Amino acid sequence: MKKVGLAQSVGPLAFALFCPANSHSRGTRGLSLDSLAQVTSGKQPDCIFCDAASRKDDENTLIVHRGQKVFVILNRYPYTTAHAMIVPYAHVAELNLASPEALDEMMRLAQRLESIYKSAYRPDGMNIGMNLGKAAGAGVAGHIHLHVLPRWFGDANFMSVVGETRLHPEELSTTFKTLSTALKQSM
Ligand SMILES: [Zn+2]
């Protein structure tokens, strides 16, 4: 009962963000974190989020904030500049399995990112959403994560239609500094 209609309920967002036809280039398959794992380590770890959280190397794993129950990590292949994901430390595949504390912290962090994006990036809009399961477009289906990203009129969708020319997001190291600093300040 809980799974019925899920794909439909996140459908428009999933299509907007994670449809392969719209995925971001850079010689990768868009937002696939699975392929990222293969690229970076040569062998796929069990879970890229658990792996990143367990390392104490936030600058390289792109973790911009560590909270009590969740952490914030940048998407290495961002759909737009400052594409972040809020992820519980607990490896759970369903929203129903996440603790109330993790869900609460997740939404509060989404709120903080909303404010940070507004002041640091002045976007025209934002996507905040979750894809549960491969059929819904999840790159890492076993570990839930909330995508949060600023959007601008005419960003990647338009450019992908035009051809090879794409809007390049800012350097990840720049985004890392901006978001990690802002998240510390807005505590
Ligand atoms: Zn995991």
Image (cartoon, helix red, strand yellow):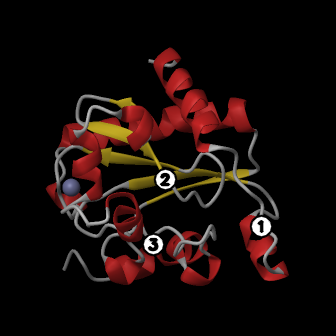
> Which residue has dot 3 on it?
10
Q: Position of residue 49 (x, y in %)?
A: 28, 52
Identity, as a three-letter code, of the amino acid under mark 2 = Asn
Compared across the picture, whether 92 is left or right of 175 comes to left
Which of marks 2 and 3 precedes in the sequence?
Answer: 3
Q: Position of residue 3 (x, y in %)?
A: 24, 78
Identity, as a three-letter code, of the amino acid under mark 1 = Arg
67 vs 2, nearest the viewer? 67
Callout 2: SS: loop
Compared across the picture, whether 155 is left or right of 116 comes to right
> Which residue has dot 1 on it?
166
Residue 165 in the image: above or below residue 60:
below
The number of numbered badges drawn on the structure is 3
Q: CA distance from mark 1 to mark 3?
A: 26 Å
> Which residue has dot 2 on it?
75
Q: Position of residue 159 (x, y in %)?
A: 80, 72
Residue 97 appearing in the image: yes
Residue 177 in the image: above or below residue 35:
above
6 vs 47, nearest the viewer? 47
Which residue occupies 59% across, 74% down?
A: 23
Which residue occupies 78% across, 76% down?
A: 164
Compared across the picture, whether 184 is left or right of 24 comes to left
Q: CB atoms at circles 3 and 2 under 8 Å apart?
A: no
Identity, as a three-letter code, of the amino acid under mark 3 = Val
Which residue occupies 26% across, 66% down?
A: 43
* Residue neighbourhood size for the residue with mark 1, other residues' Cα within 10 Å, grouped as few (<14), some (14–19), many (≥20): some
Q: Does the residue tagged 3 have its C-beta within 8 Å of any atom of ligand 1?
A: no
15 vs 10, nearest the viewer? 15
Residue 28 in the image: above or below residue 55:
below
26 vs 142, nearest the viewer? 26
Which residue occupies 38% across, 70% down?
A: 139
